Amino acid sequence: MGTKIGLMELVFRSERRRILLIFLKDRPRSIDEIQEHLSVDSVSILPQLKKLKDRELIIQKGHTYELSVIGKAIVDKMSPLMDTLEVFEENFDYWSRRSFDGIPHVLRSRLLELKNCKLIRPDLSHMFELDPKFVENLLLSKQVFSFSSYFHPSLVSLYLEISKKEAQISLILTEPVLKRFKADYSESFQTLVQFERVSLSLFPKDSKLAGVTVTDRFFLLTILPQVKFFEHESLFSSEPQALKWGTDLFSYLQKEAVPVSAKTNPIIL
């Protein structure tokens, strides 16, 4: 009698077995459904099913297969891990060079929610311009939450434009950004804060995060690199779970922020 294959090897050594186990997570599946999902014939998949049955990770009932109690416990933990790996794999060069200091631990554990983010990387001829997709979606947004630790002059006119459309806007700016906004764009600053649906706050701490914008249409995340050199690269997504993740990050930052207005707050006067 041969030695049993270890569970770790059984689950993670074969991509086909991993996909199969995750496919069975929601409900029992017929052999035809399994073959179609994995794009294989019965000759290829039956040996894998047998290995999983032998280690009691799945149970066969007639022509259908389902997870065992042990199988369910494994897959419940395996799915978040695989999703998190997928997030990093999609934009590995970006994530590997970034500092996570500005992201709270509770949200680091939820990075799997940032699947299918698109990396926005401007070319040299547009290095200091806002991404057209970002601008297009921002102008169509009805609700905007944005935090920034760097100043971009084009954002001033954009926020004024959408505030005139009665969009709800909540801005959190670091002290240097807020000071420059008020000093160099005083008239625009005074106009913006007069809108009833616009709120402006000061983030008094070292943010360790470049910026995050989340609206009813999209999510944009810009993380500072580990080295002291700012690369204007961001992650963009319209996926609902990414918008939820971004909203929770903004709420976390908002707890530390101090509301300001055109007439108050001595820090920026």
Image (cartoon, rainbow, N blue to C red):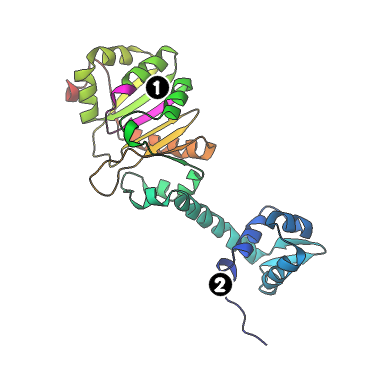
Labelled disc at residue 169:
1
Visible in this render: residue 126?
Answer: yes
Q: Amino acid type of disc 2? A: Glu
The amino acid beneath tag 1 is: Ile
- Sequence-wise, which precedes: disc 2 or disc 1? 2
The residue at 27%/18% (across/down) is 261
The reply, left or right, for residue 113 in relation to residue 51 is left
**Along the line of sight, the residue nearer the viewer: 89 or 215:** 89
Tag 2 residue: 9
Residue sitting at 68 percent across and 57 percent down?
A: 38
Q: Which residues are magenta?
A: 144-155
Q: Where in the figure is residue 22, as x and y percent of width and height?
A: 63, 57
Residue at 28%, 42% in the rendered image: 208
Label 2 vs label 1, nearer the camera: 2
Q: CA distance from mark 2 to mark 1?
A: 51 Å
- Please provide percent x and percent y for residue 76: 58, 57
Q: Residues within 10 Å of mark 1 (few under 14, many from 20)?
A: many
Residue 106 in the image: state x and y as whole percent. 41, 48
Q: Which quadrant: the C terminus? A: top left
